[in-house]
Amino acid sequence: MTDRRTFVKLMAASSGALLIGIDLSCAPGDGPGASFEPSAWLRLDGDGSVLVRVGKSEMGQGVRTSLPMIVAEEMDADFGRVRIAQASPGPDFQNLGTGGSFSLMGSWKALRHAGALARTLLVAAAAARWDVPPESCRTEAGVVIHEASGRRLSYGELAESAARQPVPEQVSLKPRSAYTLIGTPRRRIDAPDMVAGDARYGLDVRVPEMLYAAVARSPALGGTVASFDDAAARRVPGVREVVRIGSGLAVVAEHTWAALRGRDALRVDWASGPGADFDTDAHRAALRSAVRTPGVTIRRDGRGRAGFARAARTLEAAYDYPFEAHAPMEPMNATAHVRADGTCEVWTPSQTPNTVQAAAAKLLGIPRESVTVHVTLIGGGFGRRLNWDFDTEALQVAAALPGTPVQVVWSREDDMRHGHFQAGSAHWLRAGLDAAGRVTAWEHREASSMHNTRGADPSRIDTSDPDRVRDSAWGVYDTPYHVPDFEATYRHVPVPVNIGPWRAVFSPPAVFARECFLDEVAEAARRDPIELRLEMLGAGPRAVPARYEIEDEVIDRGRLRAVIERVRDASGWDTPVPAGHALGMAANFFHTETHIAYVVEVSLRPEAADGDLPFRVHRVVCALDCGLLVNPLGARQQVESGVIWSLSNMKSEMTWRGGIPRQATYGDFRVVTLDEAPDRVETHFVDAGRDDPNGIGEPVVCPLAPAVANALFRLTGRRIRGLPVRRADVGL
């Protein structure tokens, strides 16, 4: 398991490594004349166009636009002449992982330096041609200008001579005040291809002589093939082969329909595995039992739970959170071609292409440099494609058929039943208040299943190590509010279910419990929930430390207070809403140092059918401090996607009975439909003056659901203590 701290260090290390050993080359490009390639990140062609290699997977978050904006800003390139190409694993790109909301943060320094280096060398080339000092020249929109004479040279004209300039030891980066591109709203570079149907996702990959495969997997958790009869499958027209692989049996055919029909014709006896008896209801009871007593202490401030002895009043509550699927639009798939010459090529919608390359090399027994990985567009990732099980299947099938490219395609049912899920969890919270209604003590216990522990020997999982378990308790140990006596504990409850990364990882369950309970505390103390939060962030007379540091996290309470104040004012928190409507709010600090708060306005939907959302969200107001904004338009889209994602989580859950998942399609794992979407989403960016960006994609998820739940309480008087939200939960 790679924990979050290790992930951050890897991202930082790989970004720095991309600036080492820069090779200035001059070679033929796509346009007329020579091209100039000052780093692995970019190439300037003789026609003045700039090719930027994108080192992050595009799955809707807009990195194919925002990352080139960083290069173009420092380079002073004409953004209209910028083209993009997807980077592939190799010596220059040793960590192309996309996750943790680190795309902008992890690429920021490397891309700025790449653009600044190109600009410096282009200015040097122009100055040498004019025989003037470089300081007398400036750049704008792909042109070098000599200030005194007004002479101009385009970047394309300078490409060849720039490649011959000596590489400086240092380059000058622009101050924030000089930005002309960063901070401006930009439409996505790749949008025209998507609108025209020219965008290529994993399922769109076509290779000459390619075959297709569908895999039969155990219907119950952990089951394996005991025996099988493939005679009927082989008789299906178009079926070419049946291959036994690690996850089951792969039926290989000339097209997907034949592969799926062949798979249905297989007769398989499945041997029961360790998850054959898994039942969600029983597991939920086990989680609730686990939080009755404290687990491993992962944070203690002041006297910890001993501080409750001084409380004038104590409140407690319990919350649940279900297992959740990723449910992306594009099911898992990968295409692999294992050649007789000892090389391999993979086309995959992956969030971890370097891992895919390493896994292929290990499985096939060949050097990593013999494996080429092409990263396609991704039709929804949400952390699911940080795993490479679908890539492994394609590699295993292709290895059994050397020389033949094979695309493994998962059906919707495969994707839903055999995913890597968000873990179910239980939370028990307790708050101590003094006579004035101020929170003086706080305890949060969580029980869930740690990341990627399926299949591991429980005796080898060190669940007593606070550093190990802390990374499964986001939203618990990093609670941003100041409480003099604070204690957080975590208890691991093993499951036979694949537990893996999910959008915002472990934060949503804990933040849901924490922010809902904080509203309970405010209600009991007869305090306004925003006023109480602001007091716990330093707005009241009691002294509160402005910053809180734990591990490598820095919680800036002033930044969080600012977004809460902004969302209060922008939403008209103190203004009455129409009859039958109510407001609710929640806030959070996320690990990318992003601070966010939501206010939502809701009403009930008596006409809603069972399984639909029994409430309507009329308005969502978001205040967000995500550091320096690179592309405000993309950031707003991320907020809106986070709102829809969170509302979908309030609608569905994954359950098992007898080890078999009970949900398989969008028909029984329901996501938000257009008529359930909010009427309006407003985003207000709070600028704390930072010079670098923070993450957005995951932070925008966490506080939305508790804000809705808190609004529903104000509307109905009923506390929402778990998800999904059903009609009965709101009194319908």
Image (cartoon, rainbow, N blue to C red):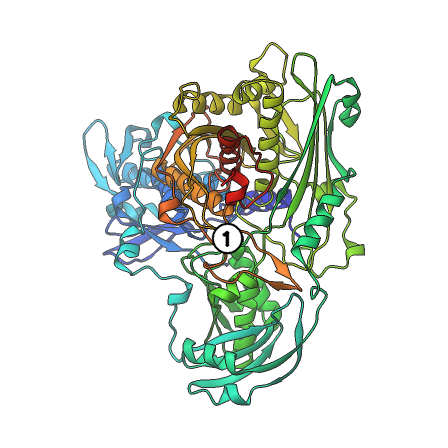
Q: Is residue 583 left or right of residue 531?
A: left
- Residue 136, by quadrant, is top left
x then y, percent, for residue 85: 37, 55
Q: How many marks?
A: 1
Residue under the image location 60 percent in, 29 percent down: 554
x then y, percent, for residue 408: 48, 71
Q: Nearer the viewer, residue 618 or 631?
A: 618
In this view, 405 is above or below 603: below
Can residue 164 be seen from the camera position used here? no
Can residue 639 be seen from the camera position used here? yes
- Residue 123, by quadrant, is top left
Residue under the image location 60 percent in, 70 percent down: 219
The furthest residue to the top: 541
Q: Nearer the viewer, residue 80 or 613?
A: 613
Q: Is residue 62 left or right of residue 381?
A: left
Q: How many neighbours does mark 1 have within 10 angstroms: few (below 14), some (14-19), or many (20 or more)?
A: many
In this view, 561 is above or below 394: above
Q: Nearer the viewer, residue 623 or 643?
A: 643
Three-letter amino acid code at disc 1? Leu
* Helix, strand or loop under label 1: loop
Q: Nearer the viewer, residue 8 or 583?
A: 583
x then y, percent, for residue 515: 58, 31
The furthest residue to the left: 150
Residue on which disc 1 sits:
96
Q: Is residue 228 left or right of residue 196?
A: right
x then y, percent, for residue 469: 71, 44
